[in-house]
Amino acid sequence: MLHTAQSRIAVVLVLAFAIPGFAQLPKQTSPQVRQKTFDAVWKTVNDKSIAPQFSHVDWAALKVRYEPQIAAVQSDAEFQDVVDRMLAETKVSHLHLVDLAKLDQQLRRAVVIRGLALRDLDNQAVVTRVIDGSAAAAAALRPGYVINSIDGMPVTNAKSAEAKLAQDKENHRLRVLDEANSTREIEIGYALPPADKLVSARIGPGNRHVLVETRTVGDGIGYLHFTNFIMPLSKRLISAFDSMRNAKGIIIDLRGNSGGETDLGLLLAGLLVDKETLISTTQTRKGETQYKAKPGKNPYLGPVVILLDEECASESEEMTAGLQAMGRVFVIGRTSRGEDMDATLEGLPMNSLALLYPVGLSRTPKGIVIEGRGVIPDLAVELTRAELLEGKDAQLEAAIQHLAR
């Protein structure tokens, strides 16, 4: 386990090391190994995780209730389901089993490999972003289109639809509602962004691909969008800020950003401050740790807006909340997911699985806990299907208007 003051993990599925034995993944394991794995999970959470204390759950009682179910399972899949249900009773983020054989699949993002983002608007899964040059753009998808089904299966919500589109590299048939409210069939393929918009990192047995975009919007306003916090992005971010040094303002678009490595969050924050700045404080079972951003070379000190939405989590929340608390950024959009725990990953006797578990509870410099609350924007702005169909991104436009004052 790698978990230090300068290198911590604050997002689901960020591995700082390889789990021994993952290359020899057994198809099934024996009841004895499953029991040992259950015991290891319970003991790790009991001895190392902050989850039981934060959630005030009776962790010993959960063991008594779930252990008999482990003896009755007939497959590894059933075992994983039972354990994850036990872990979910804490109602704490960053606590679940990771299937290492499916890690690559779990790390994929629809906005990266397909080029579209979806959100639930008026009980419909609506396309809210289409990336230029992406598979979604080639399929003639547009913001405002509604995804009704994928490969003939009805879409129940945006999150499950994005997960379906991210699970493989195959073409998929979409039934959509277009700008005229007519139903049409569209086929969407798979395509990674071009090299100038793509940064990748090896994460254990999987790969994390990150989309990064920079441009100018409005009247001389810089714009930066990226989909996850990974350290290989550091040079790109430094270069982006160098190119926007004379901008009248900068918009950092973190909508849909599910988090990543804290070191990158601190580096990004350091590009916006001229003195050492407290970003967050983490309480662990061993004590308290402060995380401070150190100013980068020639930091940008002009006005900054961060765009957040309901799919932002973990490091995207923690960095934003810290800068917001210090009055350095103005936040526009929707309240974020509220899943902000410091976490790490540990191998298990069933070597096809690993346990992701929270080790620290983060607070803003003002003592606010983001876990279960989310980052509340300074200006709440909703998206609507009608505006998206008109080519209007109300959240981005609000950011431009704020900086144009």
Image (tube, rainbow, N blue to C red):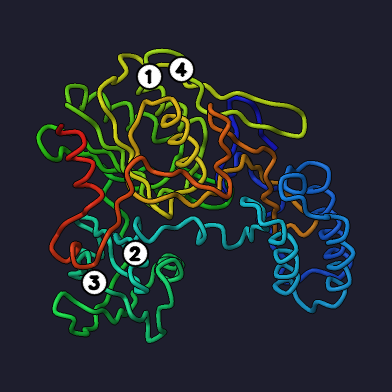
At x 41% / y 32%, what residue is drawn? 324
Give the left or right position of residue 35, taking residue 393 as reference: right
Q: Amino acid at mark 2?
A: Leu
At x 29% / y 59%, what residue is drawn? 115
Q: Position of residue 76 (x, y in %)?
A: 74, 71
Q: Quadrant of residue 302?
A: top left
**Lower sequence index among marks 2 and 1:** 2
> What crowding class fits label 2: few (fewer than 14 Cα within 10 Å), some (14-19), or many (20 or more)?
many
> How far is the residue under mark 1 from the one under mark 4?
8 Å
Q: Amino acid at mark 3?
A: Tyr
Residue at mark 4: 294
Label 2: state its secondary structure.
strand
Label 3: state its secondary structure.
loop
Residue at mark 2: 118
Q: Position of residue 171 (x, y in %)?
A: 33, 74
Q: Position of residue 88 (x, y in %)?
A: 68, 61
Label 1: state its secondary structure.
loop
